[in-house]
């Protein structure tokens, strides 16, 4: 079924839907135990909820596909993650609230260190701090405002990462990335990958040369590497597709960026998990869809720290009563993809999901975990259809056909 | 998800993947027992492996679809079995290592017996032996080398089956098969199914008339029936799609043929199951993907011999330690489709699969059998996505999207 099929069935009502997303939730056993992080965690609240919910396993993109955060979240919100795949550039731009226009080519910059011969020594410029990053972006902006008729904008993101926006109609994104993904060799050239991108390629080459000149007196960040070229694209908003007035509560820029791309209102940026749930409660009256994003599960998974990921899950579990207390019509608890500590990276494994609602038909799952969710009533399903299911349980999809 | 989506994510490494394929593995209870062939078989090795693997059920093509060997194997190797469906002719040609060209129309011949009025008495010409087949093909080839400007090639296959290749650009495959699939009536005519095939139809009609004349003094094989017209098509190889250097170990021509079509190296042709596993071991260092095909499960299923199929499965099980001993990064044990002895034919039932790998997330399946695999972590999945999953578990697919 085309994920956009549901759009024509949407009706509005006053129900409320909460998506509580633990980034990288899915896991694997690690070391001696045979339990995943979620299975090892003590989660009495989520287990009790699972007993009243319909559970299952989600495939973010498809069998064997390890998703980046962008496509994984697009799928969660009901957007075909392959058809709507977006470059890192537009995600970075969205994450820092950069006012994009339809004339923009958005590019992620990594500041790097090169030696006198131009060979890359450090692809992250020693992970310069945010202040240095801001100083360097200002320096570049002072010296480079235009390349021929193209407006050039530098914006710091964090550490060694920045955003480069080229503004003029007709720019193309089919350009080779200049980050060679390893040290010991020079940066690649921003070559055109198709003939139509030759002009953009020429502009970028001039820009890279100029920037290298401007940065030549820097000790660490004396070069920039270009990645994730993406021309701006306006996605249909959640309000337009589903009639949802949506609020995003996320502490990490990229997830706020994704939410903003899909037309969500960006809520406060609390500095704790509890702060996020408090923000949810404080804003509960004003919206009807809530995306609450927990980053730490993914971060601890990426760290390869099984026990720390378990602890984050347990902390989330302790906050679940503050969520259920709101009596949402639909509460979904899941993740965007798996990040098993055992792999210290995103993975392709399906991840557990729980959908709680008065209309959820109970299955026999009594515990929220990968192995239990295998036999849940949702079976194994593509993430992209979760939004439609949530809308249905919220009474927001009308009958199809007579 | 388009099965070809994974191609863009492929990376190379030195991992090894083994597909141990028991043809027609899936079964049904027969007679008094309520167990399938695989369930009835004593398979301690595969059961132990299942306990450490992720299991599930595969649908070769789709719900209710009984596949032929061609599409079922295409699906196993990650090729859309409907989009890439190939005629019997090209399969037969591949199976005898016929040097196909892009100008070829490949057709399967069944030698048959007709009476004086042209009515078919035996659609298999009394299953003539291979020697007779060869003699008859030589005889036809001596008399028929060209029909107008089309080169004609006869090649024996086995028993009553042969290959006919017509060689010239512009031939069409949209022709009615002449085997009426029953006796007591004359052969059908090779009519054009679309106007563009009229010329090819005319050539085939002349060829059939000529062949009947040439064979008129034969007692048994005095007619040929044409089936499975297929123009040659070059499929992308496993090396091209997945970067795999693949070896096929199969005792039956058709499976070697399929493997060759997909660019696999064709290994030795041992005359026993153990010989196949020995061949696997002897060639293990030289390749990174291994297709080991066991034909006898299917043959005994086709025979309707439940107990004999059980025995074949038990023999395979006894050889499994020789496979696991190689410590492959990914070992998949499954079949191409079901061939329940109870039906004595291929069937549409899903079939059990086991994927063993260090990154396989354990489920609760402790026994390799249809009923147990229902609750496996893979759920019920289309066969065509199995290859992507195997590649992922072998670390051969990179992340999708930022």
Image: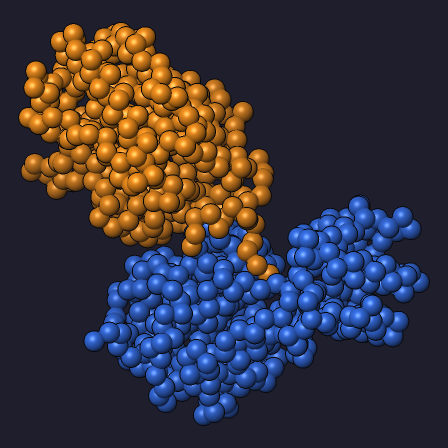
Chain colours: A blue, B orange
The quadrant of the rendering that contains the N terminus of chain B is bottom left
- Relative image position of residue A226 (x, y in whole percent): 73, 59
Which picture quadrant has residue B123?
Answer: top left
Whether B129 is drawn above or below B369: the answer is: above
Query: Farthest right residue?
Result: A217
Residue A269 pos. (x, y %): 61, 82
Instruction: Give the vertical position of A47 relative to B182 (above or below).
Output: below
**Rendered location of residue B152, percent (x, y):** 35, 18
Quarter occupied by residue A162: bottom right
Which quadrant would residue A384 be assigned to in this image?
A: bottom left
**Is B109 left, or right, of A312 in this rendering?**
left
Q: Nearer the viewer, residue A45 or B31?
A: B31
Does B152 sit left or right of A151 as displayed?
Answer: left
- Does the image show residue B332? no
Above or below for A373 versus A255: above
Q: Is residue A203 visible?
A: yes
Residue pictured at 23% horizontal, 21% vertical: B208
| Residue drawn at (26%, 65%) of the image | A364
Q: Quadrant of the C terminus of chain B?
A: bottom right
Query: Residue at horizontal 39%, vertical 21%?
Result: B149
Give the mark count: 0
- Name which residue lies at 87% across and 75% down: A142
Left or right for A240, reference A341: left
């Amino acid at each position: 079924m085309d994920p956009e099929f549901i759009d024509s069935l949407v009706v509005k009502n006053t129900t409320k839907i909460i998506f509580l997303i633990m980034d990288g939730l899915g896991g694997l056993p690690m070391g001696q135990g045979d339990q995943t992080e979620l299975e090892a965690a003590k989660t009495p609240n989520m287990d009790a909820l699972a007993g009243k919910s319909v559970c299952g396993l989600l495939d973010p993109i498809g069998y064997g596909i390890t998703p980046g955060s962008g496509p994984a979240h697009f799928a969660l919100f009901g957007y075909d993650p392959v058809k709507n795949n977006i470059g890192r550039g537009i995600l970075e731009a969205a994450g820092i609230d950069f006012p994009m226009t339809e004339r923009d080519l958005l590019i992620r910059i990594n500041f790097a260190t090169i030696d006198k011969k131009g060979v890359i020594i450090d692809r992250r410029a020693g992970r310069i701090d945010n202040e240095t990053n801001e100083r360097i972006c200002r320096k570049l902006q002072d010296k480079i405002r235009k390349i021929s008729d193209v407006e050039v904008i530098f914006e710091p993101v964090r550490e060694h990462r920045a955003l480069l926006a080229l503004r003029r109609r007709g720019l193309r994104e089919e350009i080779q990335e200049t980050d060679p993904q390893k040290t010991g060799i020079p940066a690649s050239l921003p070559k055109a990958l198709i003939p139509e991108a030759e002009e953009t390629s020429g502009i970028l080459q001039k820009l890279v040369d100029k920037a290298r000149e401007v940065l030549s007196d820097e000790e660490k960040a004396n070069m920039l590497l270009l990645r994730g070229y993406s021309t701006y694209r306006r996605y249909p908003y959640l309000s337009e597709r589903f009639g949802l007035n949506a609020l995003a509560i996320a502490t990490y820029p990229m997830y706020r960026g994704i939410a903003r791309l899909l037309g969500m209102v960006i809520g406060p940026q609390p500095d704790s998990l509890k702060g996020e749930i408090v923000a949810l409660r404080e804003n509960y009256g004003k919206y009807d869809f809530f995306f609450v994003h927990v980053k730490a599960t993914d971060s601890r998974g990426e760290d390869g720290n099984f026990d720390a990921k378990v602890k984050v899950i347990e902390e989330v579990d302790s906050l679940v009563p503050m969520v259920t207390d709101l009596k949402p019509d639909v509460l979904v608890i899941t993740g965007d993809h798996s990040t098993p500590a055992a792999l210290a990276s995103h993975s392709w494994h399906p991840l557990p999901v729980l959908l709680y609602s008065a209309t959820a038909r109970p299955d026999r799952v009594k515990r929220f975990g990968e192995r239990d969710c295998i036999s849940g009533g949702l079976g194994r399903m593509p993430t992209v259809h979760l939004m439609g299911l949530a809308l249905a349980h919220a009474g927001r999809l009308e009958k199809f056909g007579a």
